[in-house]
Amino acid sequence: MIRKSFTKLKRIIFSGLVMSLCTFVFNPTTPANAAMVQESEPNDDWTTADNLSLNTWVKGTMRRKADDRYYRDKDYYKFTISQTGETSIEIKPDDTNTINSSWDVYLSDSNKHDLCKWSNVHTLKSSKVGWMPGTYYLRVNVWSGTDGDNAYNLIVHNTPSSQWEKDRYYDDKNLSNANILSLNKEYTGNLYDKQDVDYYRFKLNGTNAVSFKFKMDDTVSKSCVWRIDFQEFNSKNPLIPKYEYVSANQTINIPKCSGDLLVKIRSYSNAEEAIYHIEASRKPITPEISSIKANKRKVSLRWKKVSNATGYYVYRSTNPKTSFKKVKTVTGGQTSYTEKKALSKNKTYYYKIVAFDKSGSKITKSNASKAKKIFVK
């Protein structure tokens, strides 16, 4: 008997049913009994794996050999992810299954590395993971329920999205193939295994201060802790902070990073299969006043140039802690300022500098420099 291709659906040509069938194929929430693709035997090893279409239910059955009571059938499936996005696996007993069947389900990559294993599952809705584009395999083994019809329904849910990380086998991941991310955009990740580590590289020009936001997904209901490490891409030097332990939504401020920022996220306690979101933004580093002088009741000050700064704000006060007033905006690459008007004599003044970066109508400010004081005679 000629084996028919697994991926071709039997088309039902009947007025009013064509549209409902199309709706099923592209809607992963459609009930499994609305339409079904039957597995094709033999599919007992990698080489005979059935081609499985994404977002399409398949009905599989664990078969027995009459002359071998210890025989355990295995069903292999192969599917391809063509775009970055989120992927999850679902399995449940078929409506015809009248016994309490359970299965072992394995997910592997094209190199046959086991990525995930779900053991003794009667029903399964796996956590979402952003698997990178490529070919993957599913293996279904019977765990219990061999004495009868133990048919199951299986589906690979997949939704393309540029927001998700590109995940792969944990032993193939390192800083050199880190996910390259842009600033000011939220990304989503998930540690699929206790040994998994996620690597990210944020592209930056020059020297910047970085604000790194970490947020747990709304689906996370357990108590978990992530460890997040930070280092410079070029020098590989650890940053300040070198790492943080995170168990809630948190913003981590990195005062200075030269070049691209590398971020490493791993589970410290129970954080596997807990979806998280990250976002990074930059701002100019904190300026440093290099000199301050007074001459004829006029104050002059200089500061060190800040990378990526469009300009600087000069603030003055007679109180070292409060009441600082902006007295000048300096642009054009200048890093100095002299008061035009004479100040009151026999008085102490305090100055601060704030660097800013203007892009369109958006202005990003640095933290203020340490206040420098000067006494005007």
Image (spheres, rainbow, N blue to C red):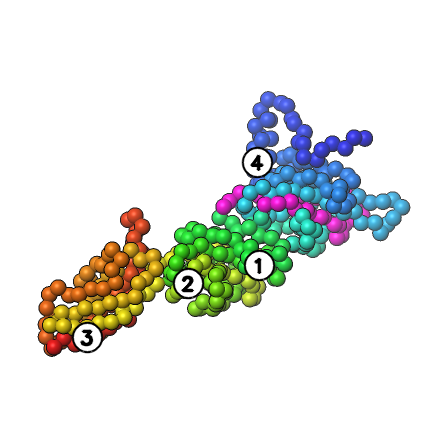
User: Which of the two marks, 2 or 4, is nearer to us in this view?
Assistant: 2
Task: Check disc 2 and report the residue beneath it.
Answer: 257
Task: Check disc 4 and report the residue beneath it.
Answer: 26
Q: Which quadrant does the C terminus fall into? A: bottom left
The residue that appears at 87% across and 48% down in the rendered structure is 68
Name the residue type under label 1. Answer: Asn
Q: Which quadrant does the N terminus fall into? A: top right
- Front residue (pair 335, 176): 335
Task: Check disc 1 and report the residue beneath it.
Answer: 174
Q: Rounded to the nearest whole Å, what is the CA distance between mark 1 and mark 4?
A: 35 Å
Q: Are marks 1 and 2 in contact (CB under 8 Å)?
A: no
Q: Are marks 3 and 2 in contact (CB under 8 Å)?
A: no
The residue that appears at 63% across and 35% down in the rendered structure is 34
- In x, y percent, where is residue 256? 39, 65
* Residue 62 showing in the rendered view: no
Q: Rounded to the nearest whole Å, what is the CA distance between mark 3 and mark 1?
A: 51 Å
Q: Is residue 151 magenta?
A: yes
Q: Earlier in the sequence, mark 3 or mark 1?
A: 1
Residues shaded magenta: 133-162
Q: Assign a secondary structure to mark 4.
A: helix
* Residue 308 showing in the rendered view: yes
Task: Check disc 3 and report the residue beneath it.
Answer: 374
Name the residue type under label 4. Answer: Phe
Seen in the image, is 118 located left or right of residue 188?
right
Q: Earlier in the sequence, mark 3 or mark 2?
A: 2
